Image (spheres, rainbow, N blue to C red):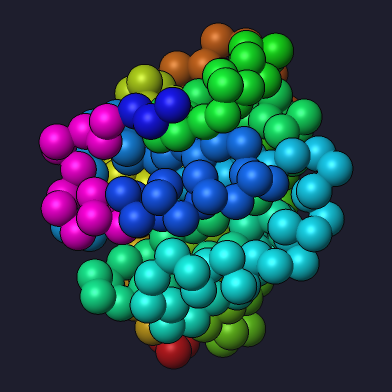
């Protein structure tokens, strides 16, 4: 069974998907192909990646994994590819194709394991409805922010960033400010806005007013400016936290971290780096 590819998908992406389905349907080890990510929300544009799930016969899964690179080569002009251990997903093959130039994620999943997923992908092709039946065995669960988990850590992170600024490790401080945006501020804001809490992905489109506020958390390579960005991160977190009824705050960690931040601010105002 082949499902028509949406007309809203850019033509280069559609061309690639057509060829991919034509190639993979000839491999009897493959049960089906589905698309996720921005394909699901009908929001693809010329800059979009293709996020694809390839369901594999359980008894053939090991052999298919061993041949991922060969399979990827058969789909188009493969420029480069590597596996996704760095994002905790070794089943993933991250590919760059040319003619057309596309970033394509190929996630090879054993048919029995498609039940565990963060979204319901759109099936582009499958054998005898088996991919669809496997998906019906469970429901997607996308990780949502845990306010208590964040609160228990946030003030220790604030102290850490302030200490790095005080020492003059500004590259580490800038990286840590980004960590706070991606792991705390962005997910909380996106979740509140009804979007997927995926770091800061598409935050400019989903909640543009918050994105304007978030710009204040970006620090320059300057101790005083990094402290300004850290103070802005604290203010934004407190604002987001105030809308969460279930969270229980602990006064001492917050007080200690803010006192320390104030001391570093005073020191750096006297001896700016």
Residue 192, position as x, y percentages in the image: 40, 22
Left or right of 228? Residue 248 is right
Left or right of 199? Residue 11 is left
Looking at this view, is 157 or 120 the one in front? 120
Q: Does the magenta run of residues contain 15? A: yes
Residue 86, position as x, y percentages in the image: 67, 66
Residue 183, position as x, y percentages in the image: 56, 47
Name above or below for residue 83 compared with residue 121: below
Residue 63 visible, this orientation: yes
Quadrant where the N terminus lies? top left
Looking at this view, is 259 or 56 the one in front? 56
Name above or below for residue 98 compared with residue 55: below
Residue at point 49%, 81% (across, down): 80
Name above or below for residue 108 compared with residue 167: above
Residue at point 44%, 89% (across, down): 273
Residue 243, position as x, y percentages in the image: 45, 17
Left or right of 22? Residue 206 is left
Question: For the magenta stretch, what is the residue range?
Answer: 4-16
Q: What is the tally of numbered marks visible in this picture?
A: 0
Looking at this view, is 1 or 67 the one in front? 1
Residue 145 visible, this orientation: no
Residue at point 70%, 13% (across, down): 137
Q: Does the magenta run of residues contain 249? A: no
Residue at point 38%, 30% (across, down): 2
Q: Quadrant of residue 236?
A: top left
């Amino acid at each position: 069974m082949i499902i028509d590819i949406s007309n809203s998908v850019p033509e280069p992406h559609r061309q690639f998907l057509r060829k991919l389905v034509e190639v993979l349907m000839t491999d009897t080890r493959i049960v089906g192909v589905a698309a996720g990510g921005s394909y699901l929300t009908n929001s693809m544009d010329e800059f979009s990646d293709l996020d694809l799930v390839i369901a594999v016969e359980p008894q053939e899964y090991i052999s298919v994994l061993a041949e991922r690179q060969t399979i990827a080569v058969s789909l188009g002009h493969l420029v480069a590819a590597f596996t996704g251990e760095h994002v905790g997903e070794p089943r993933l093959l991250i590919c760059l194709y040319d003619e057309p130039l596309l970033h394509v994620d190929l996630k090879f999943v054993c048919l029995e394991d498609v039940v565990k997923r963060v979204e319901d992908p759109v099936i582009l092709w499958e054998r005898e409805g088996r991919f669809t039946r496997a998906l019906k065995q469970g429901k997607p669960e996308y990780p949502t922010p845990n306010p208590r988990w964040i609160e228990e850590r946030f003030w220790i992170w604030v102290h850490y960033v302030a200490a790095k600024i005080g020492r003059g490790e500004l590259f580490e401080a800038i990286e840590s400010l980004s960590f706070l945006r991606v792991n705390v501020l962005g997910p909380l804001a996106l979740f509140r806005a009804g979007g997927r809490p995926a770091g800061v992905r598409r935050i400019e489109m989903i909640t543009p007013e918050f994105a304007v506020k978030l710009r204040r958390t970006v620090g320059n390579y300057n101790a005083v400016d990094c402290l300004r960005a850290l103070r802005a991160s604290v203010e934004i977190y407190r604002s987001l936290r105030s809308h969460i009824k279930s969270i229980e705050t602990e006064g001492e960690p917050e007080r200690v971290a803010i006192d320390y931040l104030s001391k570093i601010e005073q020191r750096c105002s006297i001896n700016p780096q």
